[in-house]
């Protein structure tokens, strides 16, 4: 198995890093709007794919009466889901926040249960207990605080982009001086 080392010398890497930096900044500063726009786009794509499936099934049935109507049903369901996503984008955003927060709370509760199976005399017990309680608290905070998860994703994207840009700059300096 060969490991390829990433080279920072191509311009595409720099441009994608700049785009990630901009996307991260937008996600950090306007997370609710990013989620709503993404939900609109996702809903539109679902509706278009569903409409395409309905039209395709209609044309197939027109050619052959024995064609199954499964494609039509799937298409209609996709169109309905797309319309729901478009008209209820705020509800979809809250639902996503609830799922992420619920998952963090669930992880914290499982960790808390596992912690109580440890012997209290070990230092691992107290560390595990604190981590479990922090997970539960952060899950509740994610549910109650709008778009916290998306702001965190924005921060991670910005950090990644800055590291990539720095790698590109130093790679270019090394390339110009002849150091490889």
Image (cartoon, helix red, strand yellow):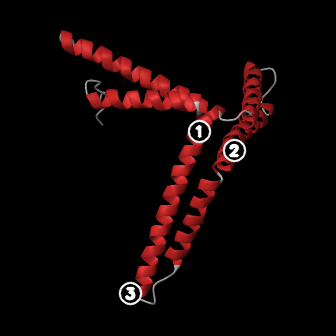
Q: Which residue is mark 2?
A: 94
Secondary structure of the residue carrying numbered label 1: helix
Name the residue located 51 percent from the left edge and 56 percent from the top edge. Answer: 44
What's the distance in space between the residues labelled 1 and 3, CA to CA?
Answer: 45 Å
The extreme top residue here reads: 177
Q: Residue furthest bottom?
A: 65
Q: Secondary structure at mark 2?
A: helix
Q: Residue 25 at what x, y percent from top left?
A: 51, 27
Which residue does the image show at 65% across and 35% down from the upper left? 147
**Closer-to-camera residue (6/149):** 149
Q: Nearer the viewer, residue 21 or 176?
A: 21
Q: Earlier in the sequence, mark 1 or mark 3?
A: 1
| Contact, mark 3 vs mark 2 (Cβ under 8 Å) | no
Position of the C terminus, as image quadrant, is: top left
The CA span between labels 3 and 2 is 44 Å
Q: Earlier in the sequence, mark 3 or mark 2?
A: 3
Q: In the rendered view, does 47 fall on the left or right side of 105?
A: left
Q: Which mark is residue 33?
A: 1
Please tell me which residue is depicted at 59% across the width and 60% down the height of the picture.
Answer: 83
Rendering quarter of residue 87: bottom right
Is the residue marked by circle 2 packed among few (<14), some (14-19), or many (20+) residues within 10 Å?
Answer: some
Tell me residue 90's x, y (percent). Answer: 67, 46
Residue situated furthest front in the rendering: 87
Image disc number at residue 63: 3
Location of residue 137 in the rendering, given as x and y in whole percent from the top left corner: 76, 30
Judged left or right of residue 166, residue 78 is right
Residue 67 vertical placement versus 121 (above, below): below
Disc 3 on helix, strand or loop? helix
Quarter occupied by residue 171: top left
Taking the spot 55% from the left edge, 32% from the top edge, the residue there is 27
Question: Where, by quadrant of the figure, is residue 172 drawn?
Answer: top left
Q: Is residue 132 rendered to the left or right of residue 41? A: right
């Amino acid at each position: 198995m060969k490991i390829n080392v990433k080279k920072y010398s191509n311009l595409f890497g720099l441009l994608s890093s700049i785009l990630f930096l901009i996307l991260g900044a937008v996600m950090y500063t306007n997370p609710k709007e990013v989620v709503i726009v993404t939900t609109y786009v996702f809903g539109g794509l679902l509706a278009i794919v569903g409409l395409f499936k309905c039209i395709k099934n209609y044309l197939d049935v027109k050619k052959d009466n024995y064609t199954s109507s499964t494609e039509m049903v799937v298409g209609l369901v996709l169109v309905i889901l797309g319309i729901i996503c478009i008209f209820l984008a705020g509800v979809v955003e809250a639902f996503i926040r609830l799922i992420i927060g619920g998952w963090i709370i669930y992880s914290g509760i499982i960790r808390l249960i596992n912690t109580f199976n440890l012997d209290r005399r070990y230092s691992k017990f107290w560390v595990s207990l604190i981590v479990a309680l922090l997970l539960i608290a952060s899950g509740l905070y994610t549910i109650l605080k709008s778009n916290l998860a998306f702001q965190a994703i924005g921060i991670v994207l910005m950090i990644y982009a800055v590291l990539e840009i720095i790698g590109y700059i130093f790679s270019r300096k090394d390339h110009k001086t002849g150091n490889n």
